[in-house]
Image (spheres, coloured by chain):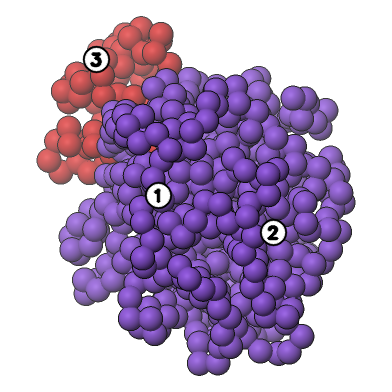
Chain colours: A purple, B red
């Protein structure tokens, strides 16, 4: 991976450059954040010509390393106003890596009101004007694009929401079955839409496999690494069997399952939407309870969920989506939630932001709590079609809260808080407050140690130890996000020492270098510091590193706990 | 005394027929968590996460913590997500 591809949407030109010396050794999030910090003015309008959209496979993407197929995407976020990295599975990371592309940087903005696509192949990078695909949903679009090329090319696209530059718009990534994975958070689909870029197609035909500098060492390390994924009970058994949605019941039992727009920590109908129920439903309908989101995924936590007639309805049906539409919006029918998930993928909106938004909209009286059919209708008829109400809803939870005068709005830096109530799972609350990404559970998944007994145990209801826990996890995650690895390797990495050492051995063998564990930690710290500096320059102060006031005012049943970590304690997070 | 025992994920295989999520157990005073699990034959080694009234019981206390009439015991194998 020795090339940077630049696509200039202002003059519709492309350019290929060698990776600058300062960026050698960076991949994934480390590279997207470095490029954004170096080249995007922090105070620019995120939807204006000075923002840049950066796609980067990870350091190990394209190799035989298990679970190394995540694609990172970065830009200034129109939702948070700060730097953003969001990553997804699909086939794009592997293809870009095989093409030798370390990063694809989309710059500028067309003057004319025309839409375009970019095709990336071995010998050429071309820009085409798009007409027929404009307005198309992501599912149909992937089929159209792959039919156009007559092969399963990689596709990264925006749906109607991205075209309309909604703050909840995501970027879809085609998976091996031509279904949808999502670069979900922070409104990156709006950035892509602002550049009038409907999709990027990738054809890796004619490219050899990515070969490590030291193949024998790489093979040995990859074998050990893969074994640790199998050996750990979470990555080897729990996730493949039930997917991420197994968390509904444990968060309910722990009193940390945000319910009815964050007014309770338990949901009476939890079993109707649980991973156990979903697993049984999938099996009964002939779906696939285990499925990988990208080539080489060994954990296989995804699934294919069929409707009552046994026809495909959705895949990658994740806990956070099911929690949001289920407990937070009180929708008990898993089929309604699956239908909503399908529509969200198709129109291209983040399922976390949108679910949190609907919880706020329900509190505002826009529709009743529990109205699953109403949610599907509003997704399809309002947001998908860009009606005035749809534009308000598509602006996300913070936007709806402002418009309707709601004070219980669970967001940090305007980004919706996912799936774990910070009052009852305080470690993740620190991550929500301090993450450079806005409220983002994946940036430092303290739930592992607070609730799941992975990496030890820190009492979720007490504030002792939470700052240090969140800080360490955010540093480690920034490093993992730079490798192209799925975040779920963190489960074995926290418990089995050989997981982390073999991961480092793979990176060293891949590039012929000699990183130590301390070097990897230093990389994570460096990524966070770079992102933090960008955010400060963009106007995000320490006062933005706080949870909404209602978490301190309203006690959460059943434990009747409030958010009690002080601003001073939160600020100590950055003492590294 | 009576306690409610709820099992999750793969541990539900240990539930008797007709019980989808859990059972009510009638136990002698002073019974412990292992005593409750033994009624259904759940191996203690598979009980990775144990909660009473929504609060974790950690390994040092699992063997000795005596159950109290009316308590709710929730038991999970190793699971994760995110």
- Quickly name the residue at label 1: A210
Query: What SS does tag 3 mark?
Result: helix
Q: CA distance from mark 2 to mark 1?
A: 27 Å
Q: Quadrant of the C terminus of chain A?
A: top right
Depth check: give the residue in front, B73 or A51: A51
Q: Give the label on residue A75, or none.
A: 2
As rendered, which of A274 and A1 lies closer to the eye?
A: A1
Q: Are marks 2 and 1 in contact (CB under 8 Å)?
A: no
User: Residue placed at 43% from the left, 38% from the top?
Assistant: A213
Check the residue under mark 1 and report the chain it is in. A
Q: The residue marked by circle 2 belongs to what chain? A: A
State which chain disc 3 sits on. B
Mark before the other along the chain sequence, 2 or 1: 2
Q: Secondary structure at mark 2?
A: strand
Element type at mark 1: loop
Residue A385: which numbered mark, if any? none
Q: Is residue A32 visible?
A: yes
Dot in front, 2 or 3: 2
Residue A194 or A412: which is nearer the viewer? A194
Q: Position of residue A399 (x, y in %)?
A: 73, 66
For disc 3, the neighbor class at 10 Å (few under 14, some 14 to 19, many from 20) is some
Please name the residue shown 55% across and 78% down the image: A126
Where in the figure is residue A196, as x and y percent of width and height? Answer: 65, 80
Q: Is residue A225 visible?
A: no
Foreground label between 1 and 3: 1
- Of badges 2 and 1, nearer the viewer stands 1
- Among the 4 quarters of the image, the one containing residue A533: top right
Residue extending furthest toward the bottom: A132
Q: Which residue is mark 3?
A: B35
**CB within 8 Å, label 1 to label 3:** no
Q: Position of residue A113 (x, y in %)?
A: 71, 90
Q: Is residue A67 above or below residue B69?
A: below
């Amino acid at each position: 991976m020795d090339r940077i591809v630049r696509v200039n949407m202002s003059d519709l030109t492309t350019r290929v450059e060698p990776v600058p010396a300062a960026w050698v050794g960076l991949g994934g999030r480390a590279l997207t954040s470095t490029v954004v910090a170096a080249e995007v003015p922090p105070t620019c309008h995120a939807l204006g010509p000075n923002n840049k959209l950066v796609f980067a496979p990870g350091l190990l993407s394209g190799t035989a390393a298990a679970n190394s197929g995540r694609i990172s995407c970065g830009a200034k976020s129109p939702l948070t106003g700060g730097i953003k990295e969001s990553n997804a599975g699909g086939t794009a990371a592997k293809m870009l890596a095989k093409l030798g592309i370390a990063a694809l940087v989309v710059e500028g903005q067309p003057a004319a009101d025309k839409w375009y696509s970019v095709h990336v192949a071995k010998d050429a990078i071309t820009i085409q004007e798009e007409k027929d695909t404009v307005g198309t949903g992501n599912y149909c679009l992937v089929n159209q694009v792959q039919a156009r090329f007559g092969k399963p090319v990689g596709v990264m696209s925006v749906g109607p929401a991205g075209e309309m530059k909604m703050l909840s718009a995501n970027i879809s990534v085609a998976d091996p079955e031509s279904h949808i994975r999502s670069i979900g958070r922070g409104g990156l689909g709006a950035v892509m839409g602002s550049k009038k870029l409907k999709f990027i197609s990738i054809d890796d035909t004619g490219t050899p496999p990515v070969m490590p500098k030291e193949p024998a060492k790489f093979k040995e390390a990859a074998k050990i690494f893969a074994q640790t994924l199998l050996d750990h009970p979470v990555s080897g058994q729990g996730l493949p069997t039930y997917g991420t949605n197994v968390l509904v019941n444990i968060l309910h039992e722990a009193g940390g399952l945000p319910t009815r727009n964050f007014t309770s920590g338990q949901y009476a109908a939890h079993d109707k939407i649980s991973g156990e129920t979903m697993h049984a439903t999938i099996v009964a309908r002939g779906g696939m309870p285990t499925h990988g989101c990208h080539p080489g995924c060994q954990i296989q936590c995804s699934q294919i969920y069929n409707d009552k007639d046994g026809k495909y309805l959705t895949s990658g049906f994740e806990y956070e989506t099911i929690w949001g539409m289920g407990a937070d919006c009180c929708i008990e029918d898993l089929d309604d939630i699956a239908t909503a998930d399908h529509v969200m993928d198709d129109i291209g909106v983040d399922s976390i932001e949108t679910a949190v938004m609907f919880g706020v909209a329900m509190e505002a009286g826009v529709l009743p709590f529990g109205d699953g059919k109403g949610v599907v209708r509003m997704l399809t008829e309002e947001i998908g079609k860009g009606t005035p109400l749809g534009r308000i809803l598509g602006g996300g939870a913070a936007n709806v809260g402002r418009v309707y005068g709601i004070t219980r709005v669970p967001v940090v830096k305007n980004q919706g808080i996912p799936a774990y109530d910070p009052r009852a799972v305080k470690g993740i609350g620190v991550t929500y407050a301090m993450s450079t990404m806005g409220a983002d559970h994946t940036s430092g998944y303290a739930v592992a140690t607070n609730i799941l007994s992975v990496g030890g145990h820190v009492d979720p209801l007490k504030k002792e130890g939470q700052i240090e826990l969140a800080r360490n996890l955010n540093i480690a995650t920034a490093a993992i996000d730079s490798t192209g690895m799925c975040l779920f390797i963190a489960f074995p990495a926290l418990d089995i020492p050989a997981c982390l050492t073999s991961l480092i051995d793979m990176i060293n063998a891949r590039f012929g270098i000699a990183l130590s564990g301390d070097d990897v930690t230093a990389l994570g710290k460096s990524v966070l510091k770079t992102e933090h500096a960008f955010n400060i320059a963009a106007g995000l102060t320490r006062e933005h590193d706080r949870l909404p006031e209602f978490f301190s005012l309203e006690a959460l049943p059943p434990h009747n706990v409030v958010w009690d970590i002080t601003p001073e304690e939160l600020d100590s997070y950055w003492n590294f | 005394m009576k306690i409610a025992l709820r099992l999750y994920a793969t541990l539900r295989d240990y539930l008797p027929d007709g019980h989808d999520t859990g059972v009510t157990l009638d136990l002698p005073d002073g019974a412990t968590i292992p005593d409750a699990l033994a009624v259904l034959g759940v191996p203690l080694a598979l009980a990775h996460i144990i909660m009473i009234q929504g609060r974790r019981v950690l390994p040092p206390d699992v063997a000795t913590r005596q159950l109290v009439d009316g308590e709710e015991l929730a038991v999970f194998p190793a699971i994760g997500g995110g």
